[in-house]
Structure formats: structure tokens, C-alpha cells
Image: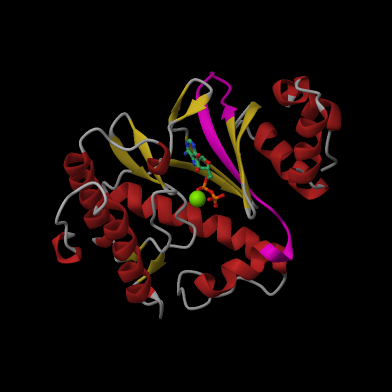
Amino acid sequence: MKTNIETLDWNLGNINASKDKDGRKTLDDVFDESTLKNIQQLFSRGIISTLENIIATGKEANVFRAKTIDGRNRAVKIYRLNTATFRKLEKYIDGDPRFKNSGNNPRERVFTWAQKEYKNLHSMWASGAKVPKPYYVHKNIVVMQYLGWRYRPYPILKDLIPVKPEEFLSYLLETIRAYRSMNLSHGDLSEYNILNVREKPHIIDVGQAVPKEHPMHEELHNRDMKNVHRFWKKYIRGLKLEDLK
Ligand SMILES: Nc1ncnc2c1ncn2[C@@H]1O[C@H](COP(=O)(O)OP(=O)(O)O)[C@@H](O)[C@H]1O
Ligand SMILES: [Mg+2]
């Protein structure tokens, strides 16, 4: 299918409206030709109808707020199709029996990665863990529940310390126990990947989460719990690593 740039321009209306130099540069940087085509396919399949604004730009991915045809918000995470992305992901894909033939081509591996994030979100969501509900995955794009109010995403934990740290932590431990019951380790759990959603934790960024069969399963979980402890001991006096169960 040929990318219909005019349709796309219309769908990107809100983003294109900010015609300042930096905004334009970000767009050119994010949307290589093949990503544009993949976004176009999401539009024509009716998964989303517009991209509204950029929430975050990262080394491996960019996150947007999008709208569905019936006006609901979605978060859309778009992985960059470059070798840097694929390098970082490699060690988490190899050894995960869910993705045996992920392909040697870097691009294919990024697609596998998006699949992996989607699957992880799905298992975690099903376990009752508080994560964004996954809606769709296509090539390098994951569509999920938007955690925010209007155009503002809820802040990461680092930027908004909860009013009641003990209570927040106990909800967090509940979520960790829930995804552990699916035999998953998050692998990058820190104050940067936990959103403070009206004083309740939601965990994001689950692409690197690995199942029990993966050689790094235990090591990653131990590192996660050390991170959790390092952060919370600043707010909860006398908190011990062994208390985090
Ligand atoms: N479902 C979501 N709802 C709202 N904001 C989100 C959502 N997912 C990610 N974000 C925002 O995008 C940022 C980057 O997302 P993340 O998944 O952590 O990607 P990265 O790999 O770049 O760290 C987050 O810090 C958060 O601000
Ligand atoms: Mg992150």
C-alpha cells in the first residue's frame, strides 16, 4: 500500500499545527518512511484516528497521545527502527522461548520487541497488575491505554512523590506480586517507569520483562527490588530489602 501523505497530514493535524522548527524536526526524526506507513495502516484499520501530541521522546521509542474514532485517548509507543534500538533489545529477546524465530534483520527484531512489550502488558494486565491495558500491536507500534488527564500524562513517580509513601508502596508490591504470579520479571523497574496515577502506582515500559525460562529472570528481579528499596528507603524510615515481599 502506498502511504497517503495527504491523509496522514490530515490525521497528524494537531501535531503539524505546531509548525515550529523543533516540532517539525522531532517529527522528521520519529517518522521514517516505513514508520509513516505503519501509522497509516493503524489509521486505515480504524485502531486510531489521529495522533494528538508527543508525550515523550526517548532513545529507543517515542510515545504519543492518540485518539480513537470515538474520541477516546490512547497511548501509542513507536519504536525507532535503527540498529541502536535493536542492540539494546537483543539480550532480552534471546533466551525468551516465546520468541524463538525473531529474525536476524534488525527491523524484524524491533517488531518482535513491540510484540514482546504487548505480550508482557497483556499477561500483566490479566494478572491484575496495574499496567496500561494493551489494545493493539502492529510492526514497531504498541497501542495501549492512555494514563493521563486530557493532554497531560500522569507524572512518573520520580516527579511526584506520593503523599502516603507506605500506602503507595503497598499497592506497588501488590502489582509486583501480580505479575510475578505470571512468572515475569520486569527488568527495568524504577521511579522512572512507575506512574503516579492519582496516588496509585501504574507500571509502564515492560518491553524487557522476561519469563522464568530466561537466563536473566532472577537477576533482573533482584535488581528491580534493589531499585525499589533504594528509592523507598528515602521516604520510609527503617525499610529493609527483606520487607519488600
Ligand atoms: N500508557 C501511557 N500513558 C501515559 N503516558 C505514558 C504511557 N506510557 C508511557 N508514557 C509516558 O512516556 C514516557 C516514556 O515511556 P516508556 O514506556 O517509559 O518508554 P522509554 O523506553 O522511552 O522509557 C513515560 O515516562 C511516560 O511519561
Ligand atoms: Mg521508561
Q: Tell me which corner region of the image, top left, top right, bottom left or bottom right, holds residue 21.
A: top right
Model colouring: secondary structure
Magenta stretch holds residue 73: yes
Which residue is drawn at the image coordinates 29% and 48% (left, top)? 129
Q: Quadrant of the N terminus?
A: top right
Q: Is residue 232 left or right of residue 166?
A: right
Q: Nearer the viewer, residue 221 or 5?
A: 221
Q: Is residue 160 left or right of residue 140?
A: left
Q: Nearer the viewer, residue 131 or 127?
A: 131
**Percent from the top left, x then y, of residue 14?**
70, 21
Which residue is drawn at the image coordinates 71% and 67% (left, top)? 106
Q: Which residues are magenta?
A: 66-84
**Percent from the top left, x then y, of residue 191?**
39, 49
Which residue is drawn at the image coordinates 73% and 37% (left, top)? 40
Q: Tell me which corner region of the image, top left, top right, bottom left or bottom right, holds residue 42.
A: top right
Which residue is drawn at the image coordinates 77% and 25% (left, top)? 16
**Percent from the top left, x then y, of residue 107?**
71, 62
**Percent from the top left, x then y, of residue 216?**
40, 77
41 to 107, vertically: above or below:
above
Q: Quadrant of the C terminus?
A: bottom left
